Amino acid sequence: MKKKELEFFRKMLKQQLEELTQRSDATIAGLLNSTISSADPLDRTSLESERDFTLRMLDRENKLILKIKKTLGKIEDQSFGICEVCGEEIDIERLKSRPVTELCIGCKIYQEKLEKFTCA
């Protein structure tokens, strides 16, 4: 991959990482400062449900943060854009739409077929 392309992805990923980290920190602060002390059982249930949803979203964001950090490491060690299964280059358009991808489209389709077959 060209140096210019690597720099494009590095900047994009660092920006995403910063935004996600800030949002994650704000969400955690909000959760720590909130209390569920309503006397009304319906209000309490609603607040608990909202908190559970927020925690699930926070977990997803944290997983994405880890993927972004791993991808930034791949940019540094020059293995970014290489499929982890077949070793071929991942199409640049696929990387633009999902820069944290680890598989080329062919290997991803194969993986999904295997998952579908084993889960059926």
Image: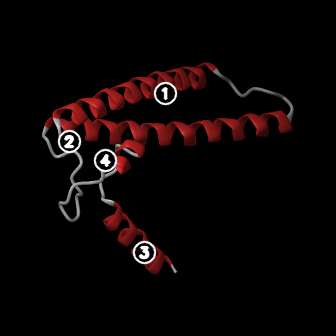
Mark 3 surroundings: few (<14), some (14-19) or many (≥20) residues within 10 A: few
- Location of mark 1 (residue): 24
Pointer 3 or 4: first along the chain: 4
Label 4 residue SS: helix
Q: Is residue 120 above or below residue 15?
A: below
Do the residues under discs 1 and 4 have CB atoms within 8 angstroms? Answer: no
Within-10-Å neighbours for mark 4: few <14, some 14–19, many 20+: few
Lower sequence index among marks 4 and 2: 2
Q: Secondary structure at mark 2?
A: helix
Q: Amino acid at mark 4?
A: Ile
Q: Marks 3 and 1, how far apart in space?
A: 34 Å
Q: Residue at x 42, y 25 (%)?
A: 21
Q: Which mark is residue 55?
A: none
Is 61 above or below relative to 84? Answer: above
Q: Amino acid at mark 2?
A: Lys
The reply to whether dot 3 and dot 1 touch (C-beta < 8 Å) is: no
**Residue under label 3:** 113
- Give 65 or 7, whichever is nearer the viewer: 7
Residue 19 shown left or right of residue 2 in the figure: right
**Residue 26 place in picture, x, y as percent:** 53, 21
First in sequence, mark 1 or 2: give its number: 1
Task: Using the rendered view, name the quadrant where residue 16 is placed.
Answer: top left
Dots 3, 2 in contact, CB < 8 A: no
Q: Which residue is mark 4?
A: 92
What x and y, as percent, mark residue 67? 34, 42
For mark 2, what is the residue?
A: 74
Marks 3 and 2, how far apart in space? 27 Å
Residue occupying image coordinates x 30% and y 34%: 9
Cα gap from disc 1 to disc 2, whole angstroms = 23 Å
Q: Nearer the viewer, mark 4 or mark 2?
A: 4
